[in-house]
Image (cartoon, rainbow, N blue to C red):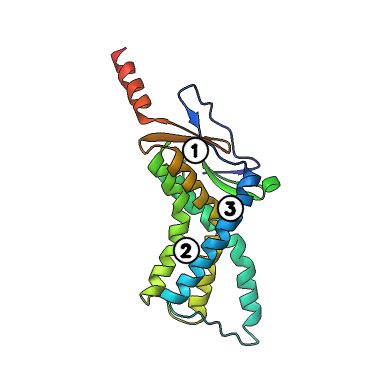
Amino acid sequence: MRFHLGAVPEDFEPDETWRTIREPGPLLMQVIALPVAVVTGTIVLIAWNVLAGPLSLQLGADSAPIAFAFALLSFPAVIIVHELIHAAVHPRWGLSRASVIGAWPSKLLFYAHYSGPLSRDRFLAVFIAPFVAITLVPLLLASVGLIPQGNIRSAVAWLSVLNALSACGDLLGVGLILFQIPRRAIVQNKGWRTYWRAKETDDARVVSSLAG
């Protein structure tokens, strides 16, 4: 795994067999994703109250500073864990040099980039994994009583909703991929841009190479 400061690395040169999808640039993507964040965060918050019971936070004078520090530190913590979960779905659990964790300050973005090709389904799994792991799994555990009520449940719910908000770009990306890339396809990023080609293209190249 590597760490990178700046734009997503452009370590891929697609040839004529690759097609790009229609997708907004990084700044426009964030603007478009804002209403997705509001809707997703609201739905998840309602789901917590409906499925896990009403959330309650009981703070004494001595615990208020701790709660404030927790809320403040939860933002970077969720971002870091979110990106690491993205990377964990990469081949070799994200431990190869092909996996890059990055920050793009000028675009206010954090990202987990894989510099090699992935199947479309693996690509989708990378996108959706943090939402499932940080937002949905705790909600499921709380709904069956495995997370105790009170401040602990409220803290976990806060992290779950916070991640639902930050996953808005991921969810939008899932939609772009589902509607534009066929299932039997190979997907790869060149920087921010997403390219794909039919898996049969790679299969035909292998056959041709063996025949030659």
Q: Residue at 51% x, 26% y: name it.
A: 14
Left/right placement of residue 90 relative to residue 65 reads: left
Q: Quadrant of the C terminus?
A: top left
- Give percent across and percent down for residue 46: 49, 72
Left/right placement of residue 163 relative to residue 50 reads: right
Are the residues flagged by discs 2 and 1 in contact, CB closer than 8 Å? no
SS assignment at label 3: helix
Residue depth check, mark 3 versus mark 2: number of the one nearer the observer: 3
- Give percent across and percent down for residue 20: 51, 32
Crowding at label 2, few (<14), some or many (≥20) Cα neighbours within 10 Å?
many
Q: Amino acid at mark 2?
A: Thr
Q: Residue at 44% x, 75% y: name it.
A: 50
- Total marks placed: 3
- Give percent across and percent down for residue 108: 67, 50
SS assignment at label 2: helix
Residue depth check, mark 2 versus mark 1: number of the one nearer the observer: 2
Q: CA distance from mark 1 to mark 3?
A: 27 Å
Badge 3 is on which residue? Answer: 33
Above or below, 100 against 56 in this view is above
Badge 2 is on which residue? Answer: 135
